[in-house]
Image (tube, helix red, strand yellow):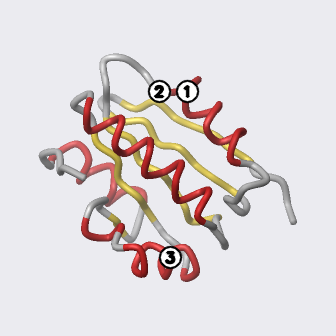
Amino acid sequence: MPPLTLAHQHLPGVTVLAVTGEMDATNRAQLEGYLRDVRREPPQRLVFDLSQVPFMDSSGLHVLLTCTTDCLKKGGAVHLAAVQPLPARLFEITGVLSHVPVHGTVEDAVTAALTSSERSI
């Protein structure tokens, strides 16, 4: 399994987080630590670029949902972009799609994050 690679880009009003590799129990702490380090105050909108995430288990899902809940409580929002088939199936089964906006491309997610109002989880 390739290691999890994380990168981010702060844009005006939104941070894009690019995730590469499988999101699972083996790298949950790495992802949580990275999110703590890159999130800005005041709360802003986050876009997760999941185009290079072929697999996600419940641990990865938990990190995304915890981040989403925290962002919403602080007035921010989370959007997901370019979700691959297996993670998309996990989102469908768990009902995440009704609580976290998912977009086909990073560009669509950034636009939506900057123009839409927050949703509650």
Q: Is residue 97 above or below residue 39?
A: below
Residue 72 in picture, x, y percent from top left: 26, 38
Seen at 53% across and 48% down, the residue is 63
- Determine which residue is flagged by label 3: 90
Q: Is residue 44 left or right of residue 35?
A: left
Mark-to-mark CA distance, 2 and 3: 25 Å
Please give left or right for residue 10 compared with residue 73 in the image.
right
Q: Is residue 82 above or below residue 4?
A: below
For residue 44, what is the image quadrant?
top left
- The residue type indicated by label 1 comes to Arg
Q: Residue at x 30, y 18 (%)?
A: 42
Q: Say which mark, if any, is on residue 39.
A: 2
Residue located 32% across and 38% down the image: 45
Pointer 2: residues within 10 angstroms few (<14), some, or many (20+)? some
**Relative image position of residue 11 (x, y in whole percent):** 40, 32
Q: Residue at x 63, y 67 (%)?
A: 57
Q: Amino acid at mark 2?
A: Arg
**Crowdedness near tag 3: few (<14), some (14–19) or many (≥20) residues, C-alpha within 10 Å:** some
Tell which residue pokes out farthest to the left in this image.
117
Residues under numbered marks 2 and 1 in contact, where contact means CB atoms less than 8 Å apart: yes
Can you tell which of label 2 and label 3 is closer to the viewer? 3
Q: Is residue 31 left or right of residue 83?
A: right
Q: Amino acid at mark 3?
A: Leu
Which residue is labeled 1 in the image? Answer: 36
Q: Which mark is residue 109?
A: none
Q: CA distance from mark 3 to mark 1?
A: 24 Å
